[in-house]
């Protein structure tokens, strides 16, 4: 990517000559071809060519040679309006011959490219062989492509989601499903504001808005919530509180757990807990969980669920205990 293929003043050399065959995909991205006889001479599979500039060429920018042993084109990789990873090449008017020559019978897709003109008839006159060049970019806009990369994560497990579909609107692009460890790429896009819609089986869909600037790279991380929430298995909820103080309340605990303590707790949900306090709470989940009370009892560290207290709680507890057990002063006898 980003390589300059520069010939001599004689313009007799070829920048790239390929005869690639087989699975996989070769990408020529952001290269500059100038003072050459041919920019690219393709004898094998079609390459992915995007964001390249062709100028000052004595022959043609791209020649797709006849290859009868090869099957149909693997994809519309020099320019496909439905694929955000292709196109945005610039074919300057300083190309002496046809800008693109296709010697094969199948139509070559050359959509979303800049032909240094806004005249469709002039563009057609610069092509040789079957080719589809519409829609085409406005003159001078090929080098102004924006890029967008979307990372899709599981919001609860904080892991990449590899089976999502990311769609942009408004656009002519198909939803992107290919990704690298949860990163979905739109390498070449026109500037503007887009709505990003993300879907994946087993998750709630999500939407996001992004403003893309010409020539800039933008990114976003979109978390998806699993369907059904996080209420299966063990979990914590809001329910019964634990403490040594006294509390009054009317309440029944719903669920599979039992409450132990010197008082009664009121709450809805499932869970086990020791403590006193009056309050209403809800517990989510199947299984066992501990909850926090909400009631007339104080919310001081002495009236919370068991477990090692935080340092700040320990200081408060010590202060309260000092107040509660303050010794009574005995008057001296005269």
Image (spheres, helix red, strand yellow):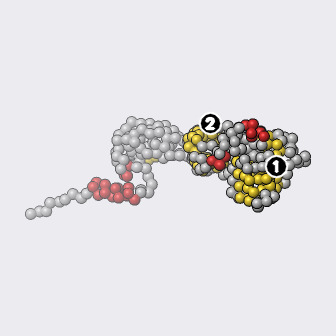
Q: Position of residue 167 (x, y in %)?
A: 64, 40
- Give the residue drawn at x 84%, y 54%: 19
Dot 2 or dot 1, earlier in sequence: 1
Tell which of 206 and 175 is nearer to you. 175
Give the left or right position of residue 240, taking residue 256 as reference. left
Quarter the C terminus occupies: bottom left
Residue 186 in sight from this viewpoint: no
Contact between marks 2 and 1 (CB within 8 A): the answer is: no
Q: Which one is nearer the viewer's eye here, 288 or 319? A: 319
* Residue annotated with mark 1: 63
Which residue is situated farthest in the left direction here? 334
Are there few (<14), some (14-19), or many (20+) residues within 10 Å of tag 2? few
Q: Is residue 75 left or right of residue 293?
A: right
Q: Residues within 10 Å of mark 1 (few under 14, many from 20)?
A: many
Q: Position of residue 278 (x, y in %)?
A: 38, 40
Label 1 element class = strand
Front one among 230 and 155: 155
Q: Is residue 139 visible?
A: yes
Q: Nearer the viewer, mark 2 or mark 1?
A: 1
Mark number for residue 170?
Answer: 2
Going 51% across and 38% down the picture, which residue do you hit? 255
């Amino acid at each position: 990517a980003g390589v300059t293929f520069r010939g001599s003043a004689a313009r007799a050399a070829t920048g790239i000559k390929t005869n690639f065959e087989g699975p996989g995909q070769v990408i020529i991205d952001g290269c500059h071809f100038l003072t050459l006889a041919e920019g690219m001479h393709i004898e094998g599979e079609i390459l992915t060519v995007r964001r390249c500039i062709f100028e000052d060429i004595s022959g043609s920018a791209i020649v797709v040679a006849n290859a009868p042993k090869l099957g149909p084109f693997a994809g519309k990789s020099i320019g496909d309006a439905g694929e955000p990873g292709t196109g945005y090449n610039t074919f300057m008017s300083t190309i002496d011959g046809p800008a693109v020559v296709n010697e094969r019978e199948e139509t070559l897709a050359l959509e979303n490219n800049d032909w240094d003109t806004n005249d469709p008839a002039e563009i057609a006159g610069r092509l040789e062989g079957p080719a589809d060049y519409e829609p085409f970019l406005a003159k001078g806009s090929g080098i102004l492509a924006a890029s967008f990369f979307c990372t899709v994560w599981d919001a609860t497990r904080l892991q990449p989601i590899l089976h999502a579909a990311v769609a942009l609107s408004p656009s002519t692009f198909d939803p992107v499903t290919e990704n690298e460890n949860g990163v979905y790429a739109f390498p070449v896009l026109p500037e503007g504001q887009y709505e990003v819609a993300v879907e994946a089986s087993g998750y709630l869909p999500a939407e996001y808005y992004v403003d893309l600037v010409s020539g800039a790279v933008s990114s976003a991380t979109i978390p998806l919530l699993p369907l059904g929430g996080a209420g299966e298995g063990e979990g914590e909820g809001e329910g019964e509180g634990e403490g040594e103080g006294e509390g009054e309340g009317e309440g029944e605990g719903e669920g599979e757990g039992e409450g132990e303590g010197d008082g009664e707790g009121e709450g809805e949900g499932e869970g086990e807990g020791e403590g006193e306090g009056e309050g209403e709470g809800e517990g989510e989940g199947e299984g066992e969980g501990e909850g926090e009370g909400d009631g007339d009892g104080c919310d001081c560290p002495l009236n919370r669920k068991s477990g090692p207290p935080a340092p700040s709680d320990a200081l408060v507890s010590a202060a309260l205990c000092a107040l509660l057990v303050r010794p009574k002063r005995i008057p001296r006898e005269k």
